[in-house]
Image (spheres, rainbow, N blue to C red):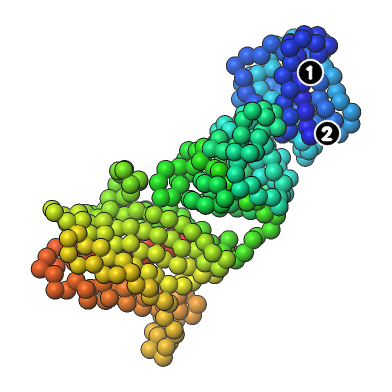
Amino acid sequence: MATVTFSNNDKNGGRSDTFNGAQRRSFSSTAWDSLQTGSNTWLVFWDESNYTGNYLKIGGQNAASNKDLKKTNRNGNNWQGEIKSFIIYANQPSWWNESTTPPNNDLNLQPHDAIFCTGTDFNDETVVYTANVSESDLNSCKFPTNNNVDMKNDIQSLATGSSAWLQIWNDVNYSGSTLRIYPNTVVYSDLNKVPRLPDGDWKNQMQSFKLYNAKPDESWNLDFDQDTFFGKFPNSVQEQDSSGTYYHYTTQDCGYDIRITGQSYDSSTMTMSFRIDYDLTGHNDKVLLDLVINSDGTFNSISYEYQQGGAVQIPKSVIKAVDVSAEVLGAVGALETAGISEEAANSFIEAFDTFCDVFNKISNGLYKISEANDGRFYMVAVCTQTLCRAFSAVTTNN
């Protein structure tokens, strides 16, 4: 394991601080005047915080290296008490033997690695795992530099190598809310900015994970773009209540609250769950929708449940994707004439027919309601719009 020990007296005597494993650290001040690196340790340090200013590279694959910082040149001065930030690498970076300034944002992850850090921007306590590995309870997983700190609910940034598939959960034993992180993911430098369904973010929320060195199954072809989804509701406004974050959307002079309540997977499908609320005096109407997508991005099924405040309730129903009938084939031909491919046409017809089925079945349960001329009846149209917008936000990686 890569190791660096900094000491505050000459020749590595006196008080010392040892850092084990690949990591990044930034300080306001230090009192170190000597250091020692272990074998297989590549160290870069700077005389300013956040990996800027004058720098020095030390270490390598061979035996340990020692440095008396009082006798080490720093642009005409020395390095005693001047190290304000450093990066430790456990493998030689590709740029190590170059004379150019080293990059300060290179994590140097190996293909099957995932890195977990207690600070944002991949700083502070750090641990690197190599696939395949799984941890069901991070309360028992310690950091290599500070064995008194466990990983449970203490991760603020993470990243994956070029052939590493990572799935995390906010509860032990791979349960609760989940997030999938794909290879070469470096966008999670601040988990406070990563939404956690049904509410909150992923800062200090991870309690278990699984790391793979190959794509585990075909459902990993799928993901969902929340920004694309909510961006399709015109003039919607993000709001918050005790149930979490939602977007308030007004149409036909009526207001509706749109929420994503879950994202789950099995080996071949992804399920996105939504809740739509319509509030009116003395009532609260709510529709729960589950959109199931096959691994190739096509429809599998839609399930819905309508709960009407104080009145009708339509029980949960499941509508499977339709078979391609002669009537549908005729519609496909018409769309092809308009320049739309057969594959796209089939997907459109399948989606449209399924949405119509949802609309008709819900409408059939509502048409006798005396308030059908207000936003309550228009709820069925909002459901259909939500499903269409949801399907357009599904992304495929195959």
For image coordinates 21% across by 73% down, the residue present is 365
Seen from the viewer's position, the closer of residues 367 and 193 is 367
- Residue at 58%, 33% in the rendered image: 118
Q: Is residue 204 above or below residue 198?
A: above
Left or right: residue 36 compared with residue 298: right
Q: Secondary structure at mark 2?
A: loop
Q: Position of residue 155 (x, y in %)?
A: 56, 37
Q: Looking at the picture, how far across and down is residue 83, in whole percent? A: 69, 17
Point out the residue furthest to the bottom here: 326
Report the side of 253 relative to 162 (left or right). left
Is residue 64 in sight in this rendering? yes
Please identify the quarter of the rendering in which residue 277 is found: bottom left
Within 10 Å of disc 1 (Cα), the crowding (few <14, some 14-19, many 20+) is many
- Comparing 366 with 207, the one in front is 207
Decide: few, some or many residues near mark 2? Use Cα within 10 Å; few <14, some 14-19, many ≥20: some
Type of amino acid under label 1? Leu
Label 2, label 1: how far apart the Cα atoms are: 15 Å
Q: What element does badge 1 sit on?
A: strand
At horizontal 24% and vertical 67% (from top left) the residue drawn is: 313
Image: 85 above or below 39: above
Is 168 positioned to the left or the right of 260 in the image? right
Identify the residue position indicated by label 1 in the image.
35
Q: Residue 40's mark?
A: 2
Where residue 355 appears, as percent x and y from the top left, is 34, 73
Going 12% across and 65% down the picture, which residue do you hit?
Answer: 371
